[in-house]
Amino acid sequence: MAKIPELLCPAGSPEKLRYALAFGADAVYAGIPRFSLRAKENPYNNSSLKEDIEYCHKLGKKIYVTANILPQNRKLQSFKSSILTIAEAGPDGIIMSDPGMIQFVRKEFPDLSIHLSVQTNTINWMSVAFWRDYGVKRIILSRELSMEELKEIHNQVPDIGLESFVHGSICIAYSGRCLLSNYFNHRDANQGTCTNSCRWEYNVKEELQEGEKVTQSPQGEYLIEEKGRDGDLMPIEEDEHGTYIMNSKDLRAIEHLDQLWRAGVESFKIEGRTKSIYYLSLITKSYRAAIDDMVASKPFDKKLLSETEKTANRGFTTAFLVSASEKKTERFNSPQEENLPQVYAGKILNERAGGWMQVEVKNRIEVGHEIEYISPQNKYRFHISAMENQTGLALQVAHGGNGTVWIKTEGKIDPFALLSRVINTPVPSPVS
């Protein structure tokens, strides 16, 4: 069996990096400002990236720096300058896609490990062999590959590292190559400014051509009978929500990690540099547990599926990894899953004597709500029995965005702990 695969998690900010590592990531990836695919939401600068490279290495963890846009001529010089600065800080690898820039790094920093971005859409073993011979150390394989194709690539080119996405958003086009955002808003997905146009609601408007007519099926679908197609009908599906014809469900491969490992994948990658700390922490903790069980030859714990469903999602799919599952990959009725069992309640900032925790509130909470406490080490539930503001005034309700409150708990309080509210908890009437 191959070496134990790493769990690679997104670091959209210095704070998120610390939560990812605390909840079990072996490695993180963070973007060079302006030159990664999350340019507009990236709070990093060269100085903070350098600090976090040192932070990861002190913990014995790895950090890969993303610089995977395909730069236009006007960006070349500044791109080279940024890479020079970051490369000298000693990341464990740099994620790239542009052949010219890869060649530049190979010449200037021959000892720096280059990981080939999913942006290159590498989908066959001959391409993998080409990049290996070009000096690339790891290939981040395209999301469009099946498990069988992954295995064949490893069998044909066993002497290069393979990385595969296992959780998160999926593009409607080849990863990062969608032109919708550019067309509608002049914000280029490949330059890090995507507006996620594939998630929008679209209304179908069909202009009939000569010889075409509209009919209605017994199920109520409107159908276009097209000229010259011998009665073939094209359905137009739209309900009260609209139609989300390009909105993919989210990838979830947590129950297939063992197959991916046996296929030769050495790094399991979670998508989500713009997601919340709550999302990042729960997903990281779930995949950490799944990997640890897998390595210990324990059966997959199906409870981990419900853990991933506590986070914001669009529904889940294995997409192309499992044969034929892509037929159920699109989400037609809304851009997001609406009936989550739990919602992010807050981040614990501090504690005081008597079992009180200081909480930065993220979504509305009330006295009586059932709360789940989540930390890297523990998980337990409790009902809010008392809540105070910063001056000690008793509160019944606290709202997200309005600062911090103190909440009474009987449980232990750990670093990096978060709270989520269990939905549909009965709330008692206020005491008069």
Image (spheres, rainbow, N blue to C red):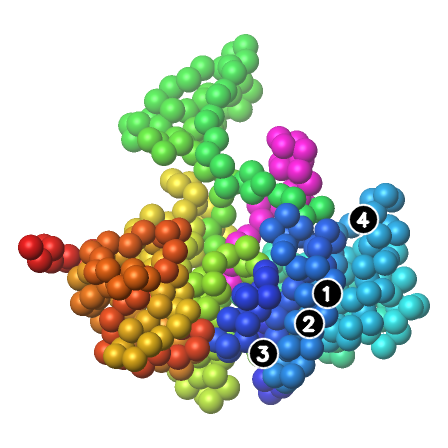
Residue at the image position 48 percent from the left and 55 percent from the top: 250
Residue 287 visible to the viewer = no
Asked whether, in this view, residue 220 is left or right of residue 385, the answer is: right
N-term-proximal mark, 1 vs 4: 1
Q: Is residue 134 magenta?
A: no
Q: Classify mark 4: helix, strand or loop.
A: loop
**Cα–Cα gap, marks 1 and 3:** 23 Å
Q: Is residue 417 above or below residue 424?
A: below
- For the point 25% across and 79% down, the residue is 354
The residue tagged 2 is 51
- Residue 219: percent from the left, percent from the top? 29, 31
Q: Residue furthest right?
A: 107
> The disc labelled 2 sits on which kind of residue?
Glu
Q: Position of residue 200 (x, y in %)?
A: 49, 37
Residue corresponding to mark 1: 47
The C terminus sits in image quarter: bottom left
346 relative to 400, above or below: below
What distance separates the C-alpha of mark 4 from that of mark 3? 30 Å
Query: How busy is the neighbourhood of tag 3: few (under 14 within 10 Å), some, or many (20 plus)?
Result: many
Q: Report the mark closest to the observer, 1 or 4.
A: 1
Q: Nearer the viewer, mark 3 or mark 2?
A: 2
Cβ atoms under marks 2 and 1 closer than 8 Å:
yes
Badge 2 density bin: few <14, some 14–19, many ≥20, Cα 10 Å: few
x 24%, y 60%: residue: 393
Magenta span: predominant SS is: loop
Marks 1/4: CA distance? 22 Å
Report the residue at 76% width, 79% height from top. 159
Q: Work out how far the residue at label 4 is from the one at label 2, CA to CA, in angstroms.
A: 26 Å
Query: What amino acid is at disc 3?
Result: Asp
Position of residue 262 relative to residue 42, above or below, is below
Q: Are marks 4 and 3 in contact (CB under 8 Å)?
A: no
Which stretch did the figure color magenta? 167-189
